Image (cartoon, rainbow, N blue to C red):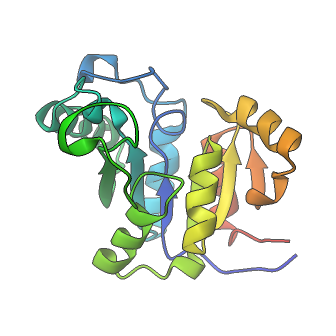
C-alpha cells in the first residue's frame, strides 16, 4: 500500500454525498445534509485541505432551475455548513446537457462529468495539484471525472452509490475507485490518512 500524503484538495460531488439526492433539487427548502457530512467537511477544513464541490446541474439546461435559484440553494448549503463550523472553498457546476433542454445549455461541453472540466478549472484557479487530489462521489461519472483529471478516487455507498457499485461490477469497472466507503465521513478518514492507494 502506497502512502500519498495528505491530499492537495478534496473534490466532492454534491447530491448523494454531502446532501440527500432529491432528484432535481429546485429550491433551498428541499436541501438536507447527509448525516455527518458537515462534521467531515469541518475536519478537512481544520486539516487545511481545500474542499471543492463539482456538480452537474442539468436542471438548468432543462429550464427547471435558474442561476439565481441555484445560488440560493448553494447559499443555504453554505449556511448549514457554517452552523456546524464547516465551509466550502469553492463550488463549480455544469449547467449543460448534451441532448435535453433548450437554448445555450443544450450542448456538448467539457465540464459535465464524466468530463474533468470542472476539476481542471478548479486546479487552474485554486492552484491545486490534481495528482495529489481526491475525488469523492456516488456515481460512475464522478469517478471517471476524477480519474481523467489524475486524482485518486473514492466511491461512497450513499446516494446512488450502491447501485453504482453494482454497475461497476457488472461492467468490470471496479478499478475506477481506489477505495469504497459506506459513508462520506469514512472517505474523509481515508483522505486524512493520506488516501493510500493500491
- 50 above or below 19? below
Residue shown at 42% from the left, 51% from the top? 112
Residue shown at 34% from the left, 41% from the top? 81
Return the x and y of residue 166 as percentages of the image width and height: 82, 34
Find residue 178 and report its image quarter: bottom right
- 35 above or below 56? above
Residue shown at 63% from the left, 66% from the top? 147
Return the x and y of residue 66 as percentages of the image width and height: 16, 31
Q: In this view, does 131 lie to the left or right of 91?
A: right
The C terminus: image quadrant? bottom right
Q: Is residue 188 visible?
A: no
Q: In this view, does 65 lie to the left or right of 80?
A: left
Find residue 71 and report its image quarter: top left
Find residue 25 and report its image quarter: top left
Return the x and y of residue 181 as percentages of the image width and height: 74, 45
Looking at this view, is 63 or 100 the one in front? Answer: 100
Residue shown at 16% from the left, 30% from the top? 69
Q: In this view, does 16 lie to the left or right of 54?
A: right
Total numbered labels: 0
Residue that sits furthest to the top in the current view: 29
Residue that sits furthest to the left in the current view: 68
The N terminus: image quadrant? bottom right
Return the x and y of residue 134 as percentages of the image width and height: 58, 65
Q: In this view, does 18 lie to the left or right of 177?
A: left
Q: Can residue 86 be seen in this view?
A: yes
Amino acid at each position: 500500500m502506497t502512502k500519498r500524503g495528505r491530499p492537495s484538495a478534496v473534490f466532492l460531488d454534491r447530491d448523494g454525498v454531502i446532501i440527500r439526492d432529491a432528484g432535481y433539487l429546485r429550491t433551498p427548502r428541499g436541501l438536507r445534509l447527509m448525516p455527518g457530512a458537515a462534521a467531515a467537511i469541518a475536519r478537512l477544513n481544520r486539516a487545511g485541505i481545500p474542499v471543492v464541490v463539482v456538480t452537474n446541474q442539468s436542471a438548468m439546461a432543462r429550464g427547471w432551475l435558474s442561476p439565481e435559484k441555484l445560488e440560493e440553494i448553494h447559499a443555504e448549503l453554505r449556511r448549514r455548513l457554517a452552523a456546524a463550523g464547516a465551509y466550502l472553498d469553492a463550488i463549480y457546476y455544469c449547467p449543460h446537457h448534451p441532448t435535453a433542454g433548450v437554448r445555450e445549455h443544450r450542448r456538448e461541453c467539457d465540464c459535465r462529468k464524466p468530463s474533468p472540466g470542472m476539476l481542471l478549472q478548479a486546479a487552474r484557479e485554486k492552484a491545486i495539484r490534481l495528482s495529489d487530489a481526491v475525488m469523492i462521489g456516488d456515481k460512475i461519472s464522478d469517478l471517471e471525472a476524477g480519474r481523467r483529471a489524475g486524482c485518486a478516487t473514492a466511491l461512497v455507498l450513499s446516494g446512488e452509490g450502491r447501485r453504482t457499485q453494482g454497475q461497476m461490477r457488472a461492467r468490470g469497472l471496479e478499478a475506477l475507485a481506489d477505495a469504497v466507503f459506506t459513508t462520506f465521513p469514512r472517505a474523509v478518514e481515508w483522505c486524512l490518512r493520506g488516501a493510500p492507494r493500491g
